[in-house]
Image (cartoon, helix red, strand yellow):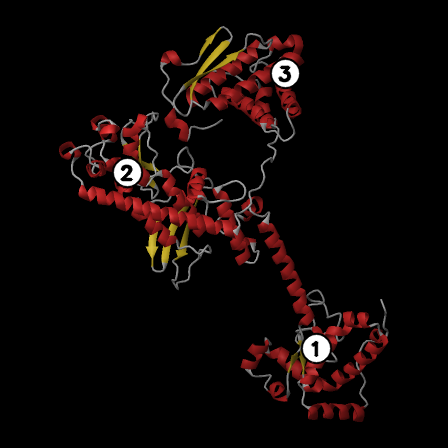
Amino acid sequence: MPRRGERTRYFTELAEEDRPQRIGGRWELEVFTATGRRARVKVDTTGLACRRLADELAAELADYVELKRPHPTGVFTYRQGLLDLCSFVDREAGPEAAACSLASSEPDVSFYIREWIRALPGQFEEGSTRPYFLAADVLSLIRFRGQHPERVLAPAVQRVLTTAIPASIPRTHRQLEEFTRAEKRELVRAAWADIRGLKRRLKRGRELVAAGADPRTAGWTSLANLAFGLANGMVTPLDIWRALPNHHSWPAEPKEVFDFAEVRFSPSTGRYLLTIAIASLLYPRNIDLQSFRVLLIAATGHAPEEAAYLTEDDMEFVPGGVRLRLVKRRAHKIRYREFKEMGAESRVMHPDRAGLSTAEILRTLIEVTAGARRRSTAAKPYLFIRGSVIPHTDNSHQRGELSFRPFEPVGRGGGLDEWVRRTGVTVAGKMDIRRLRKSTKVEKTIAFRGLVSDAADDHTEQVFWGHYAHGTTLRTMAGHTITRAQTDWLKRALAGPVVLDEQAADRLGDPGVLDTLGLDVKQAEDIVQGELDMGVSSCRDPYQSPYSPPGEFCAVAPLRCLECANAFVLPSNLPQLLLFAEHLKLLAARLDPRVFNRTWGQSRTNLKAVLADVLPADLERARRQITDQGLRLQLPLSSFVEFDS
């Protein structure tokens, strides 16, 4: 069931005589719209065969309207679901329809409820959300009846509440794509330009207040006096409306303020519009605060609700930046983040990557809202406070007063769409503030090279995959994943042995050399003593080969030793290396060049690099050793058989 939320203030307490009444089989439900206007919703059950069931559901709907006071749109959906179910029961139950009741087991109403839910999707277009909401609303009315201490539900009907699954909500909405970098720059530029205009306007208001006096004694036609009276709480806009003469008698100064305050003058409501213009010179309007909302989301990358509902207690300026307490109401999460000030050298947890200074934005916000925050009566010391004149149609406050209320992200007269039109920004697609947060997510994904654990730092990884891992973000992550895989294999392919000359081999036992080479004492001793000699090179650990599972002996030694970072080439390996070079030369002459390069090309490249660093005298000594001792290449027999494919 919908809960009482922000719309509660629009509803008026129902008098006893105005409560839902039933006249015969006709129920009249009285509800109130968002503007406070009365509306009547009628539920007629007289023509239904299952009159008993219909009246039970209608009674629950009447109680629900009285207790919860929902918006008329929601009541219409409940009524449609109620009547649709009863019409289905009339068709399917036949003569038994008159005896159907939520409190009776015979006939079994739960069967018809389940069948109705199953049949709902076929009555609407594919992808429609109506089947889900109609079924969910009817089950809500039944659940609401079960909470009444004097009303009984049959056991089978109670089981429906736990076993009947409404038709699922289809995912009909398209995923929002982020703003391009050019669009984001344009939004940021427009926001700062709008803030500069706001500061000029407020400066003009301060100048008027400084030059003004009490309008009750100094006169009502002076713009400075009117600004002075409003700023100091001496008069209300209603007082100005009553005391100000007709606009034909105004001097030039009050008329000029309309253009400066960006308020369009109308003769029929001139006094009212003049107070709005003066108030806009003294306090920021709702639409003015949209610029700060855009900048904070661009700078921090956090959710819009976390930025728009910041309070004075959530902010602490620290050396090099600002520390914020960010509250995400929907997830019931509180996080502390520190943001770096432009040019600061201190290391921060989450540097803003949009080229914006969060601390500068907040200082400017504090400056322009100082007057409104001093006069605010909000329950919390919100940073986003706007000042406005209560219009004629607002029934939640006394008309003709100055109101200092928290910022409203959406709403007529100060929403984001109107801000975009006012600033002249052009963006492709729908103007949605969530796209700006997603732009920052894409930048963060690129900065962290596609690592989800780092990009999803202000929510769970599951939320990241569901809300952000598509479009550019997904392509970026896929690209980084492929690049990492290619880089890993490329490093393996290009990795070669560590070559040690005689001096380095003699110092292999030194602790400093061991740390540099990543060896322990036992490995160094085994290499020096030849216990880890694999043929053409030695190996730090043949049981930890990159070409075989851990714990198994290397399956490619010594054929791939020259492509392995575990290999160590000592001066004692030079004879075998020279013999291996002759072996590769023969293979190059016998095999197709493409086959040879694919199989042995990297080994030959690494071998040439190793031999190029050996002194000619050492090479000559190794060749004499091969001749004098009759050495042969120590390779497996299988390596002497070449395959062309």
Of callouts 3 and 1, which one flags the residue occurring earlier in the amino acid sequence? Answer: 3
> Residue 356 in the image: x percent, y percent?
42, 55
* Category of crowding for the residue at label 1, using alpha-carbon neighbours closer than 10 angstroms: few (below 14), some (14–19), many (at least 20): some
Tell me if label 3 and label 2 are in contact, CB under 8 Å: no
Give the quarter of the image for residue 49: top right
- Residue underneath mark 2: 256
- Residue underneath mark 3: 88
* Category of crowding for the residue at label 2, using alpha-carbon neighbours closer than 10 angstroms: few (below 14), some (14–19), many (at least 20): few
Left or right? Give the position of 439 relative to 527: left
x 39%, y 59%: residue: 342
Give the quarter of the image for residue 410: top left
x 19%, y 37%: residue: 225
State the CA–CA distance, disc 2 to disc 1. Answer: 82 Å
Which disc, if any, is residue 606?
A: 1
> Residue 556 in the image: x percent, y percent?
75, 71
> Residue 323 in the image: x percent, y percent?
37, 53
Name the kind of residue labelled 3 in the image: Phe
Query: Mark 2 or mark 1: which is in front?
Result: 2
